[in-house]
Image (cartoon, coloured by chain):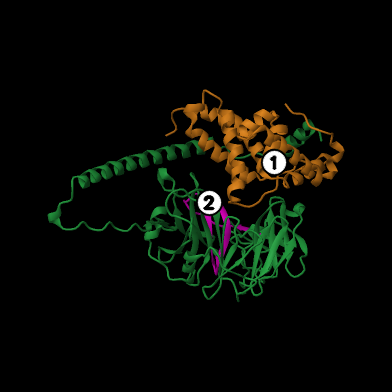
Chain colours: A orange, B green
Amino acid sequence: MLKGGYESYLAFVTARQPALIRAATLVSGDPELAQDLVQDALVKLALSWEKVRDGYPEAYVRRILYRDAISWRRRFRRERLGVVVDLPLPDPTDAADARLALRAALSRLTTKQRAVLVLRFYEDLSEHQTADLLGVGIGTVKSQTHAALSRLRLHAPELNALLTPGVTSD
Amino acid sequence: MTDSRLGELMHDLVAEVSGPAMARTAWTKSVRIRRRRRILAVVTAGTLVAGTTFALVGALGPDRSAGPAAEPASPTSTALAAAPGEPRILQAPARDEVTTLPSFASPLAELSRVPTAATALTDSPLKRAVAAVQRDTGPIFVLGPGNDWRSVSGGALTSDAISPDGRKLALVQSAGIRVVDVATGVGRLLAVPESATSRIDSIRWLAAGGQIAVGGDAGSVLLTVADGQITPLDGPAHEIAAGQSEDPLVRVTATVLVSGSEAGRETRRELGTGTDVELGSWSGTARQSGGRVAQTAFLRPDDTQAVAVIELASGRVTDLLRLDFGGPKATRSYGCCETLGWSSNQTVLLRDGGSVLAWSPTAGKLYRVAQLPGTSTRGADTSDQVRVALAP
């Protein structure tokens, strides 16, 4: 049953899965839902593996992952199977306060806003790359980024000390 | 925050997030899906060949000596065999065949006759609302117990708009919730600050009818109807079982029962587990009747829609109504189907596009209740332009 390009698929997924789960966790705000999203994206990747293995499978699977994460909320406001689990906090030091504030503030954003922030600042993609991956215009990326950052400032004033005017773009 | 600092914080936030190895499972699933697709392609091809042959024979003319051709059998819902412990599964007919389902005797059949104009509710109030319908952003038509229609404007209808006693409607506006007294027709806007919920996307009446849980992207609040007072609500508003509990801490969804306040602690129990049916996710409101909950589900791997009945005591999915997309023509679209409630005789009422259907899990039968005016069971699905609410 496990034949064809399984070996190369296994090597790719083994290398990239942890990063995909971390990104999905940031976008969805929920580690269990993130696993569901990654699992579904990996199934779709496997279905197209023969076509994309020699191209850019990383871009392919990320496109699926981010778009599914957004449509998951927008279309159906689905509930997921399982219980809500908080994101783990690595340690109780001062830095944890900032993480706690950021986590709470991220949860107040829409999924699309989180996706844009994650792509721009966590994945370090340009506005153009972000727009391409999400299938939206650059204007949308700009407006969503602006709205998301404004909301972060509103809901995490304790992080304001770290704020500087403007953010870098392309 | 600089972009680099924000990125660093995000990296820190998920530094220790991990998950089980998924490669083998995902690959195995893809193999299964490919095999299923191949089987489906063969079956489809066989059906096409048979259909073409049949059409050719028909074109050559019937054998008149054999008498009139028999009427084609009415398409109907199909009960699929269930393994012990697995849910009983009923396959709904294709969307364009639901009109051939047996009809279901119910006052809700009046939904087939939603008017285009009606006396205003303020001019002629009703004792209570039985159902309400809204097309696009037009007026809301309210059905009374005597099969009389009234109209009311000023807000968007959701499937949870009618209060548990049927005496009030909660309509969503951008500034908050407009509560309309059905007995007088008078409406009052209860403001909900944008910062509390962002865009409102769900409301639930609590059982006593005095409070409404209002939820949006940014959070949820509890709105007291008498004085418009707002209190923060911990957890999503859409998890609250419509009209079932006076305690906002007690939630019922098809996925998670029960978050109750036991000695101040929240307890949760998963539902819908222990079955081979791959329930991917859920949508809409969980509708409770006694010891059972009905809710719309999406099945893996292709997001086929279904309505699941779950036994609360065991958390087991006992029955499943499959509402398949309908092949290449995709006569059902994503989000086409919605669980509306239970009728008094333990029948689940649901909306399938513009059709209101009744499903008896016990009898394994599906019935047609009404076809909303302006909707069709053929062609593109425009059912999202019509919204329906039933009294709990």
Can residue B248 be seen in the rendering of this structure?
no
Residue drawn at x 81%, y 45% is: A154
Query: How many residues crowd around disc 1 within 10 Å: few (fewer than 14), some, or many (20 or more)?
Result: many
Image quarter hosting the C terminus of chain B:
bottom right
* Residue B340 position by quadrant: bottom right
Position of residue A166 relative to residue B63, above or below, is above
Residue drawn at x 75%, y 43% is: A89
| Circles 2 and 1 on the same chain | no
Q: Secondary structure at mark 1?
A: helix
* Labelled disc at residue B79: none
Q: Which amino acid type is marked by label 2? A: Gly
* Residue B52 position by quadrant: top left
Q: Which amino acid type is marked by label 1? A: Gln
* Labelled disc at residue A113: 1
Which residues are drawn in magenta?
Answer: B267-296
- Majority secondary structure of the magenta segment? strand
Q: CA distance from mark 2 to mark 1?
A: 23 Å
